[in-house]
Image: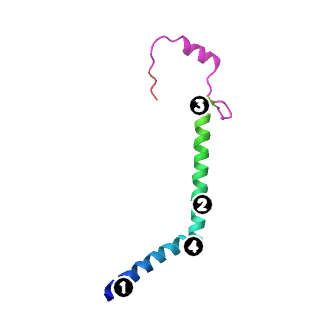
Amino acid sequence: MNDLKKNENRKKNFIGSIKESFSGRKFRSGAYVTATSAVVIAIVIIINMIVSQLGLQADLTSKKLYTLSDETIDFVKDIKEDITIYM
C-alpha cells in the first residue's frame, strides 16, 4: 500500500513538473518565436505561389545577363527541330 502511494506521488510530481515547464517564461517566448516563424514562412510561400502563377519574371542583374534579346527570341521561334544544350 505504501508503494502505491509513492508511485502516485511520483506521478503527481512528474505531471506537476511538466505543467510548470509549459507555463514558464521560456516556453511562452519560445512559442511566440515559433509561431512568428511559422507565419513568416507561410507568407513567403503564399507570395511565391502567387508570383509563380502570374508568370512574373525579372532580371535584376545590372547588365541584364539573363534576358533574351528580341532577335534571340525570334530566332528560337523559327527552329523546327529539337535542340539539346549541354552545360
Q: Which one is earlier in the sequence, the residue at label 3 or at label 2? A: 2
**Residue flagged by tag 3: what amino acid is it?**
Gln
Q: Which residue is mark 3?
A: 53
Q: Which residue is mark 1?
A: 5
**Residue flagged by tag 1: what amino acid is it?**
Lys
Left or right: where 45 falls relative to 8:
right
Spatial distance from mark 1 to mark 4, Cα to Cα? 28 Å
Q: Which residue is mark 2?
A: 33
Q: Position of residue 37 (x, y in %)?
A: 59, 54
Q: Which residue is mark 4?
A: 24
Q: Position of residue 7 (x, y in %)?
A: 35, 82
* Tag nearer the camera, 1 or 3: 1
Assess disc 4: are there few (<14), some (14-19) or many (≥20) residues with their C-alpha within 10 Å of its C-alpha: few
Q: Which one is earlier in the sequence, the residue at label 1 or at label 2? A: 1
* Image position of 67 with respect to 39: above or below: above
Secondary-structure class at tag 4 = loop
Q: Which one is earlier in the sequence, the residue at label 4 or at label 2? A: 4
Quadrant including the N terminus: bottom left
Q: Which one is earlier in the sequence, the residue at label 1 or at label 3? A: 1
Residue range in magenta is: 58-83
